[in-house]
Amino acid sequence: MKKLIVHILFLSIAFFFSRCNSSNSAKSLAYEQAVQQSDAVSSEVEMNVASVEATSSPSTTLPVDKKIIRTGSISFESNDLNKSKSHIQQIVKQKNAYIESEDANAGSSYSSISLTIRIPSTGFDGFIADLENGEDKVTSKSIQANDVTAQYVDVESRLKSKRIYLERYRKLVATAKTTKDLLEIEEQIRSLQEEIDSYESTFRVLNNQIAYSTLTIAISNQQDRITAGPSFWVNLKDAFSDSWDILAGLFFGLIRVWPILLLIVIFIIAFGKWRRKRIVLRKNRNL
């Protein structure tokens, strides 16, 4: 009996230790699985964060189109201004350009035409080449290219940012609880709208200058430049014209000072009468 009790006690102790070992093994296994799952979740989170950062961060390898404003001036000497102008108008039509302004000067010894032309930037070089292939002689030429890429990108980004802020403030109007809050929000909206209008105006000007290059063309009459001098009849005409101008000047000058002249005439007449009276008195005294 005593041996049986000892045997049962021994089995109980063995069973207790086996349960503890199995429990510890289960806990260890569960812990290892939790650690593995945690590591897997962490890896997945890290991958998602990296993916988001990759998609949200701006790419530095993407090419940026250059924004170039091209301007130029070119001068010609021509034997026939009308013919030269007609030739330019034909090129303007062919290149889908347009004449922005035109000035003409004509005199007795010199005549010229000045044209300001807006040309699609893609056809700017071809336009100049067609001009140089004409009959007129090129006397001067100047071409400039101004890179405004940084300014263009800056204005574009500022404009987008202001529009986003404006949209947010417009949504805040419905959440205003007091009149003061509403007035402050409307003031911000007004200020943002003014800034947006200014940026939009600058943006339109930049786009126009980039899309259309500007060329100034000056044409002078070559025959007028080599003329020896005015003829005899021209000199005679100029002399008569100068004489007439002098006479007209004297006439109008006398009209301006006629009160003074009238006083002088009255004084002379009065002095003459007084002198004649003195002479008559002297003669009567002598008699």
Image (cartoon, rainbow, N blue to C red):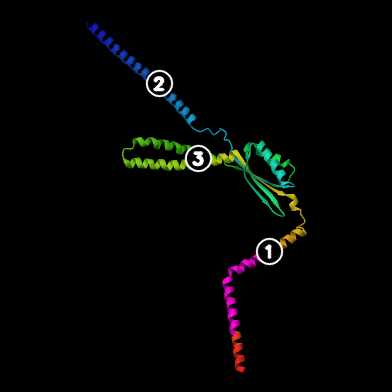
How many numbered discs sit on the rendered protein? 3
Q: Specify which label sits upstream in the sequence, 1 or 3.
A: 3
Q: Give the amino acid at mark 2.
A: Gln
Q: Residue at x 45, y 39 (%)?
A: 162
Position of residue 250 relative to residue 95, above or below, is below
Q: List x then y, in percent, for residue 237.
A: 73, 60
Q: Is residue 73 in the magenta section?
A: no
Q: Specify which label sits upstream in the sequence, 2 or 3.
A: 2
Question: How far apart are the alpha carbons under marks 1 and 3?
Answer: 60 Å
Position of residue 49 relative to residue 239, above or below, is above
Local packing at callout 2 (Cα closer than 10 Å; few below 14, some 14-19, many 20+) is few
Residue 144: in sight, yes or no? no
Disc 2 + disc 3, Cβ < 8 Å: no
Regarding mark 2 in the picture, which secondary structure is present there? helix
Question: How far apart are the alpha carbons under marks 1 and 2?
Answer: 113 Å
Q: Residue furthest bottom?
A: 287
Mark 1 highlights which residue? 244
Q: Give the amino acid at mark 1.
A: Trp
Regarding mark 3 in the picture, which secondary structure is present there? helix
Question: How far apart are the alpha carbons under marks 2 and 3?
Answer: 54 Å
Please report the bounds of the magenta region as a residue range: 247-274
Mark 3 highlights which residue? 200
Q: List x then y, in percent, for residue 226.
A: 76, 53
Query: Toward the viewer: 74 or 57?
Result: 74
Q: Give the amino acid at mark 3.
A: Glu
- On residue 37, which mark appears? 2
Mark 1 or mark 2: which is in front?
1
Regarding mark 1 in the picture, which secondary structure is present there? helix
Query: Toward the viewer: 114 or 153?
Result: 114
Judge from the rendering whether residue 147 lies leftward or rightward of residue 167; answer left or right. right
